[in-house]
Image: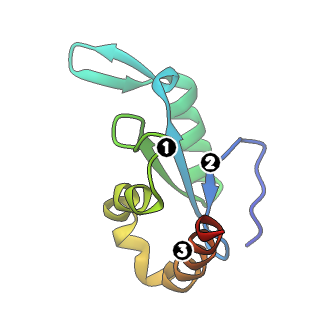
Amino acid sequence: REFQTRYSIDMAIRGTNILIEVDGPTHYAVAPSGREALGATVMKRRQLSGAGYHLISVPYWVWPSKDSSLAARLAALHPLLAPALPLIRGETRRFVAREEEEEGE
């Protein structure tokens, strides 16, 4: 299914309905129970889910810094993607190989 939405999405796994969004601090409010997603973020998640996408939201406090290695980013994603890995294993391998090639240049 072709990826089509008016929302800005950080990552999409080609050939699947899986989207990955790293939600920064502006997506959350501080509440007595901890950090809570703001209404616009909750609505985006609900609408994408309703359109048939599986959105994996990665909170900013889990995501490595922008200067981190590919290995650190993959390590942060792995527990969130683990349930879907059998479906996306081939695409992930191609992505990792391409990223490692680019880092080596």
Specify which label sits upstream in the sequence, 2 or 1: 2
Which residue appears farthest toward the left when viewing the image?
Answer: 33
Q: Residues within 10 Å of mark 2 (few under 14, many from 20)?
A: few
Q: Position of residue 61 (x, y in %)?
A: 34, 34
Whether residues under marks 2 and 3 lie with C-beta atoms below 8 angstroms apart, the answer is no
Q: Residue at x 36, y 25 (%)?
A: 36
Amino acid type indicated by mark 3: Val
**Residue holding disc 3:** 96
**Residue holding disc 2:** 10
Q: Position of residue 67 (x, y in %)?
A: 49, 43
Specify which label sits upstream in the sequence, 2 or 3: 2
Q: Residues within 10 Å of mark 1 (few under 14, many from 20)?
A: few
Q: Residues within 10 Å of mark 3 (few under 14, many from 20)?
A: some
Using the numbered discs, state the Cα–Cα distance from disc 2 to disc 3 in whole angstroms.
Answer: 16 Å
Front one among 59 and 32 = 59
**Residue holding disc 1:** 67
Amino acid type indicated by mark 1: Asp
Residue 53 vertical position relative to residue 91 in the rendered view, above or below: above
Using the numbered discs, state the Cα–Cα distance from disc 2 to disc 1 in whole angstroms.
Answer: 16 Å
Residue 25 vertical position relative to residue 73 in the rendered view, above or below: above
Q: Residue at x 40, y 65 (%)?
A: 81
Location of the N terminus by quadrant is bottom right
Q: Residue at x 62, y 48 (%)?
A: 10
Residue 40 vertical position relative to residue 46 in the rendered view, above or below: above
Q: Residue at x 44, y 39 (%)?
A: 65
In the image, 95: left or right of 38? right
Q: Select label 1 or label 3 by which is in front.
A: 1
Disc 3 element: helix
Q: Select label 2 or label 3 by which is in front.
A: 3
